Image (spheres, rainbow, N blue to C red):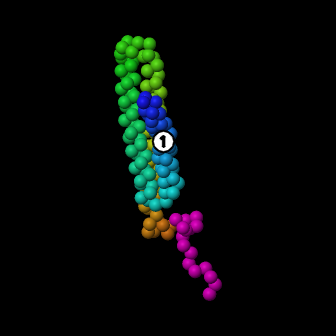
Amino acid sequence: MNLPRFVATFSLLAVFAAASPLAGAAENFDIDAVVKSAKTRSDHEAVAKYYEDAAKEAQVKASEQQSLLEEYESKGYLYGRNAEDMKSRASAALRKYEKAAQSSSKEAAMHRQMAAQLGDSSGEHGAKAFNVANEPPRENSLPQ
């Protein structure tokens, strides 16, 4: 009776373990696909919003790691032998999250700039963009 329960539990764990990396890969694939296909102002604004949210989330996680690091440094005696390892892990995680926040902020700024440029490309600005070397438009240059 314990064997079928063990097999069922093990099967469920195997399914969850197999599915979890795919979920993260699918999420990353979606943003990569959106970034590659972004052509309009609203597309770039949506991508910028995604990266801004990612930067905020990474900054929150970085501040959590900073608090842990301060805790480990001030009260390392509570953690015994593990104190140095815990400090190292918290410090590494802090650097990772700060780097991720900085990278996401740069991506967001880049897409905000692209959205602004696409927003400015209407009206006279759009006509000027098609002019060769920004020369003034020529009058009819054909012989009459």
Quarter of the image for residue 54 reads top left
| Residue position marked by numbered label 1 in the rendering | 19
Q: How many marks?
A: 1
Relative depth, front residue between 123 and 115: 115
Tell me the crowding category of disc 1: few under 14, some 14 to 19, or many 20 or more residues within 10 angstroms, Cα based: few
Q: For the magenta stretch, what is the residue range?
A: 129-144
Residue at left offset 46%, top offset 24%: 89
User: Which residue occupies the extreme right position in the image?
Assistant: 143
Q: Residue shown at 42%/48% (left/top)?
A: 50
Foreground of the two, 139 or 37: 37
Q: Locate the C terminus by quadrant.
A: bottom right
Asked whether residue 65 is in view, the answer is yes
Residue 134 locus on image (x, y percent): 55, 65
Q: Is residue 56 left or right of residue 130?
A: left
Q: Residue at x 46, y 19 (%)?
A: 85
Q: Is residue 1 above or below residue 116?
A: above
Decide whether the magenta segment is chiefly helix, strand or loop.
loop
Q: Secondary structure at mark 1?
A: helix
Q: Against 74, is 142 above or below? A: below
Residue 1, given in percent of the width and then of the height, sits at 42, 30
42 lies above or below 142: above
* Residue type beneath disc 1: Ala
Residue 103 appears in the figure: no
Taking the spot 50% from the left edge, 43% from the top edge, the residue there is 22
Magenta run includes residue 72: no
User: For this rendering, which residue is in front, 24 or 46?
Assistant: 24
Residue 40 position, x and y percent, is: 46, 61
Q: Is residue 79 above or below residue 95?
A: above
